[in-house]
Amino acid sequence: MTFLGLILRSIAEQCVSKDGADLRKRPPLSLMVRSAAKRRVSNHEADLVLRDAILWIAPQDEVGVKSKALNEWMTFRVRTLAAIALSLAVTTPASAQPQDGKGTEFRAYVQKLWPQAEKRGVTRRTFDLAFAGVEPDPSVLALTQRQAEYGRPVGVYISGTLSPGRLSGGAQQMVKWADTLAAIERQFGVDPAIIVAIWGLETSYGAGPGNKDIIRSLATLAASGYREEFCRDELLYALMILQEGHISRDKITGSWAGAMGQPQFIPSSFVRWAVDFSGDGKRDIWTNVPDVLGSIANYFRKNGWQPGMPWGFEVSPPRSFDFRKSRGSFAEWAALGFHRADGGKFPESGSAYLLFPSGARGPGFLVTDNFVAIKRYNISDAYALAIAHLADRLRGGRPLVAAWPADDIQLGRDERIRLQRALASRGYPVNNFIGQIDFDQRDAIRAEQAKAGLRSDGHPDAALLQWLAKPAR
C-alpha cells in the first residue's frame, strides 16, 4: 500500500469499522481532513491511492465476495475523501506553501538561485525583474499527476488527436504556409507534414499554447521538490532567454510544466534548437509562425531525422509468423509475407522495427529511425504514432485499416515501472525506471512472453506482469 493509501486508510478507519458496522458513528469530515492534512504526503504516490483505499476498506462476506451495496456506498465515500486528501497532498507541499503563509521558504529558494543565474550571464536586473511579485502557484503541482498518453487505450488517444477540426485545420495551415514550409524543408530536410502535425498536436496550430507564467511555474515546481534538479535547470534557461531579449517578461508563457510557445519547447530546447527563421533578429516561438515552424524542423534535424526516410507504415502480418522477430530490413519483411496495409510498396532500402502498440490483436506497424526521431520530441509511442498518422492524413493518406481492440487496457505508469524493475531483475538492460518502454525493452518483453507461453508481440500487458511477478525460471 502506498503512503498516501495509508493516510486514506486512517481516514477510512474513522468512517467505518472493518466489518462495516455502525456507519453513522464517525467524526465530522472537517476533523478527518484536518487530521490528514497534518501528514506529509509524497505526491508521486497518488496513482494507486483510490485502489488501495477501496481494496482495504471493502468488506467481504464469508466466501470472500464483497458486499455490493455497502461497497458501492463506501466507494462513493472513499472517492470523496480521496479527492480531498489528494488535493491537500498535492497542492500544499511544505516548500510551496510554508507555514507562515507569507511565501518565506519559496522566496528563500529563489534567492539561492542568484549565483547560478549570474554564472549563466543573467544580470541582477533581469533576475529581479523575472521574480518581481512572483508567488508559488498551487495549481501546478496537482497537474503533475496527469499524463495523457499513459493508461489510455491507444486507439482512443489517436482518435482524439485526429479530430475533424485538427485535420481540417492542418490542411488549411499546409496551404497557408506552403512557401515557408518549402523553404524550411530545403534548409532542414524535414517533412512539412510532420512539422505541421507537431504544431497541431502541441497547441492546435498556435491556438492553445498555454497561459501559465513559465517563471512562476518552474519556480513553484523546483521549490516544492518536484523533479527539483530538472526544473531548476529549466528555470535558469528561462532566465537566459529573458536576458537575451527574445521575449518580454510578461509574455514568457506556456504550460504548467514549463513548455513554451506554439511548439511547446522547454527552455533548454529553446536555447539549443529555436531558430530565427523570419530573420527579424529574435527567436520568437510565441507569435512568429516562421520561427515556430523552423524551430520544430531544426529540433528534428538535430535529433536524428533523416531526409527522405518515411516514419513507417501500417502493415498486415502474415498468418503464420514468429512474433519474436522484431527487426529487419524492408526486403526481409517483404520476404516474410508482410504487406503495407494501404497497398503501397516498401522502400527498396532501409530497415524497420515491428511495433504492436495494443498487441497483435490491433494494428501493427513497421517503424523506422524517423519514428524514433519523433519520440525524441515526446517519448510516448502513442504520441509518436499520432503525429505520424496525422502527418499521413495531412498528405492525403487514408485512415488506419485495422481496428483497435475494444478492450485495449494499457498498463498505467506504476505498472510499467514494476514491469521494468522485473525485467531488470532478470538481467535485461533497462535504461530508465519511469515507465518509458523502448524497443530494447519490448524485445525483452518478447523473450519473457515466449517463456510464459504468451504471444510474443512485445506488448506489455497484465498477463505479462502477472508472469513477471513469479520467481524467474
Image (cartoon, rainbow, N blue to C red):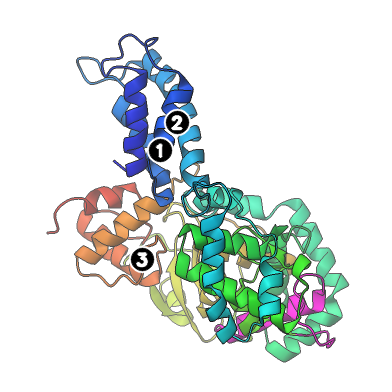
Up/down of 120 relative to 68, above or below: below
Magenta residue check for 292: yes
Give the SS element for disc 1. Answer: loop
Residue of label 2: 34
Q: Residue at x 40, y 13 (%)?
A: 69
Question: Is 341 positioned to the left or the right of 58 in the image?
Answer: right
Which residue type carries mark 3?
Arg
Q: Are marks 1 and 2 in contact (CB under 8 Å)?
A: yes
Magenta residue check for 368: no
Of residues 380 and 273, the one nearer the viewer is 273
Up/down of 175 relative to 305, above or below: above
Up/down of 68 relative to 273, above or below: above
Q: Give the magenta range.
A: 276-304
Whole-angstrom CA distance, mark 1 to mark 3, is 43 Å
Q: Can you tell which of label 3 and label 2 is closer to the viewer? A: 2
Which residue type carries mark 2?
Arg
Which residue type carries mark 1?
Lys
Residue of label 3: 442
Q: Position of residue 3 (x, y in %)?
A: 32, 43
Up/down of 273 relative to 96, above or below: below
Q: Residue at x 34, y 21 (%)?
A: 14
> On the rendered image, what quadrant is the N terminus found in?
top left
Residue of label 1: 38
Give the SS element for disc 3. Answer: helix
Crowding at dot 2, Cα within 10 Å, few <14 / some 14-19 / many 20+, comes out as few
Q: Residue at x 24, y 15 (%)?
A: 61
Of residues 316 and 9, the one nearer the viewer is 9
Whole-angstrom CA distance, mark 3 to mark 2, is 45 Å
